[in-house]
Image (tube, coloured by chain):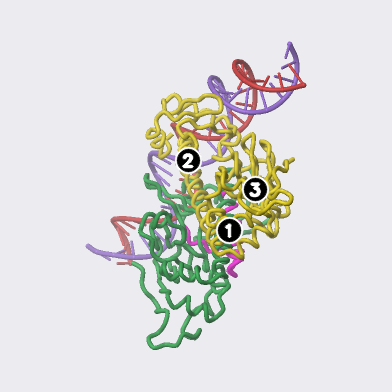
Chain colours: A green, B yellow, C purple, D red
DNA sequence: CGGTTAGTTGAGTGCATTCAATCCCAGTGG
DNA sequence: CCACTGGGATTGAATGCACTCAACTAACCG
């Protein structure tokens, strides 16, 4: 069960930035929050609820009646599509600042949102509040378009890797992608602290966990990476990028 | 080379609907054109150029400097990502009314746009005209958001099929998807006239042409479909849908 | 008629999967 | 303190599905 955290506005508080975590939020200048000047940001944040989620907890489930739109402020989460047969395809991993829970089918969430890391924190915006804000704020509408475009490109890129690359190249490509994402978020990108399990990675790449494990071993034997528990050290970025392009 | 067709406005013509094909356009009420009342539609169409493309011709290429945004008015096209190794991943097929050429990376097209059927006709909107119109017209901004959302869902759905289904199920799923798309466009959907080659289907599903061919044969032997040249007749829609879900 | 392109089918290979065993580690309770 | 347990990861052996290579057919066109 998600735990409610800081209320957006302390009782009797004044709507200034001091009452809010936004100035220190890693997502302050990404996608939907980026175009908002302090006053608009304050108004946007006032309808928001901060929530904390434990690993493997669902932020929302495919088919559930539409609830909040979420923006990650800490941790790593995933968007996934479950199959009737019990399998699932992870469509993308989310980093702090990323938005999820936006897409819907006839008033229901289109996908699952799942916490991947031990501690995930979100700003949760009630749908009406979110939609109303986008409708009244042109810059925010533009930001949503840009965000959707970026996500569509990212998903398309990933689909290309899934359709065309053999298993080892897929894993190498995954590591290069994560490296770039970590770097873009100002996180350590030579040594990646990956909270996702082999199952998560397999569900993302369309591979079995044993195949993912073997691919990691292969890359390690080639001295492209080093493994130590949850951390992956990229020893040879250029070599890894080459492995991500072709061949097993 | 694309052939220029009807200019948007006949010389000396008056900007009324009589001069334009919009009222008879199959895409008149889809995505970006849908929210435009006749006057706005006329203004939007006035900056447009109609073009005709032959099979396998590129509307635009990944990496090329950004040009027009395209809306199909006839035929079937595809959006694809080419790999350095010469392979390509087809990301989606486009039907009349669908838009492509919108996504960009730093002023360059992100993907290829390719004509799949023998005759493809487009409305081609110069980038500035398109962007300016979206910026000045709120309803159009909303329409672009909805379109991007729908495409993102579609691509995600396809990625799920690619990651989780074996070859025969993937082909069955492809046929079900095309059936739904044909039906949604008011086209005959029991007997599908598929203009794409086995290579196109393979590039879409992440399979080799021989595997696609064998999957078609398997589905035919199970009496789920019948094959005759470019047309596929769906004999057992429920059975085909079941085959699309699981198992080889 | 020969040349080309698209599609089908067969034979054999190889890569990812399945099945299974083992290891490691953290948590728990005797 | 240590045995037990469960989840995650790794590795091995064997299977099977999709791929590669190749032959052949059909349709189309010069």
Picture coordinates of residue D11, whole percent (x, y): 50, 46
Q: Quadrant of the N terminus of chain B?
A: top right
Which residue lies under the disc numbered 2?
B177
Which element is circle 1 on?
Answer: helix
Which element is circle 2 on?
Answer: helix
- Residue B191 or A152: which is nearer the viewer? B191
Report the Cα–Cα distance between label 1 and label 2. Answer: 23 Å
Which disc number belongs to residue B92?
none
Report the Cα–Cα distance between label 3 and label 1. Answer: 34 Å
Which disc number belongs to residue B19?
3
Which disc number belongs to residue A149?
1
Instruction: Locate residue C12: give its quadrant.
Output: top right
- Residue B35 or A233: which is nearer the viewer? B35
Q: Chain of mark 3?
A: B
Residue that appears at 60% across and 40% down: B74
Residue that appears at 45% across and 64% down: A117
Report the Cα–Cα distance between label 2 and label 3. Answer: 36 Å
Picture coordinates of residue A129, whole percent (x, y): 43, 71
**Part of the protein shown in magenta:** A170-196
Tag 3 and tag 1 share a subunit: no
Q: Is residue A194 magenta?
A: yes
């Amino acid at each position: 069960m998600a735990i409610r955290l800081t209320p957006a506005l302390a009782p009797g508080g004044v709507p200034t930035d001091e009452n809010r975590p936004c100035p220190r939020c890693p997502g302050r200048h990404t996608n939907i929050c980026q175009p908002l000047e302090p006053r608009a940001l304050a108004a946007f944040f006032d309808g928001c609820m901060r929530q904390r989620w434990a690993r493997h907890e669902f932020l929302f489930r495919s088919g559930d009646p539409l609830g909040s739109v979420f923006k990650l402020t800490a941790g790593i989460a995933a968007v996934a599509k479950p199959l009737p047969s019990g399998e699932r395809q992870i469509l993308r991993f989310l980093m702090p600042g990323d938005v999820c829970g936006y897409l819907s089918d006839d008033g229901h969430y289109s996908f699952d949102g799942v916490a991947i890391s031990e501690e995930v924190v979100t700003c949760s915006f009630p749908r009406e509040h979110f939609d109303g804000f986008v409708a009244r704020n042109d810059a925010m509408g533009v930001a949503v378009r840009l965000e959707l475009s970026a996500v569509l490109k990212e998903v398309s890129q990933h689909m290309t890797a899934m359709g065309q690359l053999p298993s080892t190249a897929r894993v190498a490509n995954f590591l290069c992608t994560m490296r770039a994402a970590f770097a873009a978020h100002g996180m350590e990108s030579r040594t990646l602290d990956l909270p996702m399990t082999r199952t998560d990675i397999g569900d993302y790449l369309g591979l079995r966990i044993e195949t993912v494990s073997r691919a990691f071993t292969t890359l390690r034997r080639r001295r492209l990476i080093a493994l130590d528990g949850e951390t992956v050290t990229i020893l040879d970025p250029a070599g890894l990028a080459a492995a991500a392009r072709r061949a097993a």
